[in-house]
Image (spheres, rainbow, N blue to C red):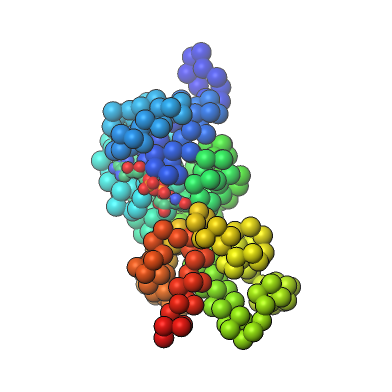
């Protein structure tokens, strides 16, 4: 604690203020932390300023004097560049580093190892939950890192989320995230093609839902996020597949899962098929759709042969 400051106030550098980072940084500022924000986009900086953050000149400027650094960047190459160019040489050793981006496991482990070698405590802490959860402070964080790093990261992540789970050592947060989303992608496709088949066999979708949601075919994709409009709780299907979890982000996570499977030498044929189908969906009208919108693509491609 510095003189005259609230005991719980932390100086936090926040780098990457896009769709997700904007809301997360705003929640840290709202909780009374001193947030030094940086993004290469001027528009993103304007929003951060309006949300109570202090604007930094550069990534290096943001991390100077920070007790913690949070990053929320698009992909592994951005994370590597920001840590190697801005963070490692300008932050004080001992600073806590939290990367909340979704990136490949190999880069997460490598950057984590380099951070440890330079005397930093680092966690990979990817999130489950979208833009609304980032804005509302209800994200779920899956955290990889040492017990000591997790202990220090938890109170900061708590401000931005509703659940913070320690998944294991460095890289384990990313591993948990892509394994969960590989399962989600595959079960969503299975749910979609099953409802399409059920309807083509003359079953009413609501009746099939009532049966299968209480039988062994039940899954989260069916009971919490049913891809058929008007069936199950309110979901993006009821809003023309707008909002929710965008299909290109599902494709990104499936690509990361396949990279990890290749590196680990594991056979994941369902994951590979899910990746191929989401790639086709994104190229054929799904770019701006929720990932459950693949039900229409599957139906269309059945009819078109
Ligand atoms: P985004 O593209 O909206 O935001 C990324 C931000 O990083 C941009 O504002 C960009 O200008 C900034 N940036 C890029 N390089 C930079 C650099 N060198 N220095 C400073 N800023 C830089 O992406 P997003 O939707 O906010 O997603 C961020 C991460 O969260 C991704 O890894 C994504 O996979 C993951 N994620 C997103 C969602 C979602 O619903 N959007 C959900 C879960 C996880």
Report the side of 210 relative to 55 (left or right). right
Which residue shows up at 33% across the image and 53% down it? 76
State the image quarter where residue 58 is shown. top left
State the image quarter where residue 105 is shown. bottom left
Query: Which percent across, then down, holds residue 146?
Result: 49, 48
Extreme residue toward the left, this view: 85
Which residue shows up at 58% across the image and 60% down it? 238
Query: Quick check: can you spot residue 181?
Result: no
State the image quarter where residue 92 is shown. top left
Which residue shows up at 37% across the image and 72% down it? 280
Judging depth in this view, the residue of 60 and 140 nearest the camera is 140
Task: Count up the numbered dots.
Answer: 0
Judging depth in this view, the residue of 200 and 25 nearest the camera is 200
- In the image, residue 125 above or below residue 263: above
Report the side of 6 relative to 114 (left or right). right
Report the side of 18 relative to 210 (left or right). left
Query: Which percent across, then down, holds residue 60?
Result: 29, 32
- In the image, residue 219 above or below residue 86: below
Query: Which percent across, then down, holds residue 288?
Result: 41, 58
Which residue shows up at 48% across the image and 63% down it? 291
- In the image, residue 224 above or below residue 57: below
Report the side of 296 relative to 209 (left or right). left
Extreme residue toward the top, this view: 4
Quick one: quadrant of the C terminus? bottom left
Query: Quick check: can you spot residue 283?
Result: yes
- In the image, residue 258 above or below residue 7: below
Judging depth in this view, the residue of 293 and 91 nearest the camera is 293
Query: Which percent across, then down, holds residue 302?
Result: 46, 82
């Amino acid at each position: 604690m510095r003189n005259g400051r609230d005991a719980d106030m932390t100086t936090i550098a926040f780098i990457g203020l896009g769709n997700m980072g904007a809301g997360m940084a705003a929640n840290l500022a709202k909780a009374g932390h001193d947030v030094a924000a940086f993004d290469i986009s001027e528009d993103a900086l304007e929003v951060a300023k309006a949300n109570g953050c202090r604007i930094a000149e550069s990534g290096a400027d943001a991390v100077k004097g920070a007790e913690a650094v949070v990053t929320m960047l698009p992909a592994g190459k951005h994370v590597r560049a920001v840590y190697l160019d801005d963070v490692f040489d300008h932050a004080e050793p001992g600073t806590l580093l939290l990367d909340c981006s979704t990136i490949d496991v190999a880069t997460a482990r490598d950057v984590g190892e380099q951070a440890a070698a330079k005397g930093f405590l680092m966690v990979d802490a990817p999130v489950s939950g979208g833009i609304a959860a980032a804005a509302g402070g209800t994200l779920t964080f899956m955290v990889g890192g040492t017990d000591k790093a997790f202990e220090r990261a938890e109170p900061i992540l708590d401000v931005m989320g509703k659940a913070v789970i320690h998944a294991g050592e460095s890289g384990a947060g990313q591993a948990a995230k892509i394994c969960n989303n590989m399962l989600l992608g595959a079960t969503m496709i299975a749910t979609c093609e099953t409802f399409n088949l059920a309807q083509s066999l003359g079953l009413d979708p609501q009746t099939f839902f009532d049966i299968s949601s209480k039988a062994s075919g039940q899954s989260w994709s069916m009971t919490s996020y049913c891809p058929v409009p008007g069936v199950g709780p309110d979901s993006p299907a009821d809003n023309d597949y707008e909002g929710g979890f965008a299909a290109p982000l599902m494709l990104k996570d499936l690509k990361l899962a396949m990279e990890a499977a290749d590196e680990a030498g594991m056979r994941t044929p369902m994951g590979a098929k899910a990746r191929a189908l989401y790639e086709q969906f994104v190229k054929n009208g799904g770019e701006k759709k929720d990932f459950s919108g693949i039900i229409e693509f599957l139906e269309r491609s059945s009819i078109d042969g």
